[in-house]
Image: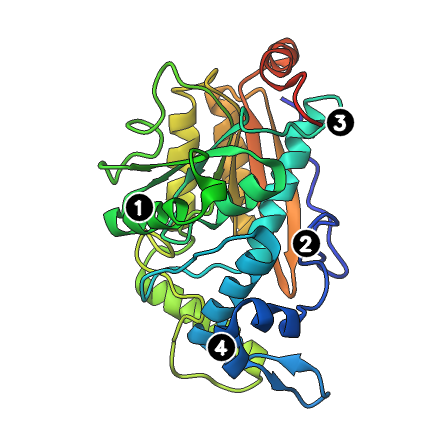
Amino acid sequence: MPKPSPEKKLEKPSVHPRNRHNGRYDLRELYMANPELKPFVTKNKYGNLSIDFFNPAAVKALNKGLLLSHYDIEYWDIPEGYLCPPIPGRADYIHHIADILAESNHGNIPKGSQIKCLDIGVGANCVYPIIGNSTFDWSFVGSDIDEKAITNAQKICASNPALKDKVELRLQSNMERIFPGILAADEFFDLTICNPPFHATQAEAEAGTLRKLTNLKKKRVKNPQLNFGGKGGELWTDGGEKRFILNMINESAQFPKNCAWYSTLVSKQSNLKTFYDRLEKIGAVTHKTVMMGQGNKLSRIVAWTFLNKQEMEEWAEKRWNNLDK
């Protein structure tokens, strides 16, 4: 397997050029789309419209506005305390993974409902299926260990005609498993995506949030309120991201020909070598690492496949050719 190139250091993190959120938010347009946002919009010291991004209610109202304005989502809501993800970062993942598919398809991004994506940990917010379906018309299966999250995601899909028959939600009943029980032996996906729980404990998640808020506010913050929300299973799990992703890599080897490209977000650069070593050990044909930049935050996507060049060409010919480009 070819060794991955080292990560390139980005002078200024930037969003994907196709990302609809490339630039400042048009908050006037967004509160026109979602009036719930307007009370949170004020002028900052530079005279520009802004919101308090440390206020969970403001962030939720902003997300509603973004999904209404940019993705034609008529209804979107999440239960209190559940993860309210930053939309631009989620869109970046979708665009970067689409580029990886394009590299396997003569430079053309496969589009249409025939393209199936498995979202591991879809959450109550159902944001990845919303963005992927709106942008590329992909179909999704979303899995989660949280029954309440699945129920809420089902309500979002049922309330938006654009998502009807495009998103299927599946409850993972075994908290120790990722693919078994979700991915059937005779089922095929073109890609899988995952935003894994990055932390090992709730205390670790809260400590990370305190550091981030302290750095951003330039003063000590004592209240570890998560402005984007999040619960156990969303933000933390036993063993953190390293154990979770290693489990995912190991389990993907049980379904080597069921998916063209497996992928996951990786928060900690220090974990990459461990993941690369495991991918080589289980027989992945190749893997890629794609850097992403959102504001001051850097993250990365690790993607891998068990298909060799000929198998990938056959996959593209069978599943991707003659689709809308």
Give the SS element for disc 1: helix
Of marks 4 and 1, the one in the foreground: 1
The residue furthest bottom is: 45
What's the mark number on residue 20? 2
Distance CA(mark 2)–CA(mark 4): 23 Å
Q: Earlier in the sequence, mark 3 or mark 4?
A: 4
Q: Earlier in the sequence, mark 3 or mark 2?
A: 2
Image quadrant occupied by the N terminus: top right
Q: Earlier in the sequence, mark 2 or mark 1?
A: 2
Residue 303 is situated, as x and y percent measured from the top left of the image, at: 57, 34
Crowd band around label 1 with a 10 angstrom C-alpha radius: few (<14), some (14–19), many (20+): many
Q: Nearer the viewer, residue 255 or 26?
A: 26
The reply to whether residue 4 is visible in this rendering is no
Distance CA(mark 2)–CA(mark 1): 27 Å
Q: Is residue 144 above or below residue 231?
A: above
Q: Name the residue under label 3.
A: 107
Of marks 3 and 2, the one in the foreground: 2
Q: Are marks 4 and 1 in contact (CB under 8 Å)?
A: no
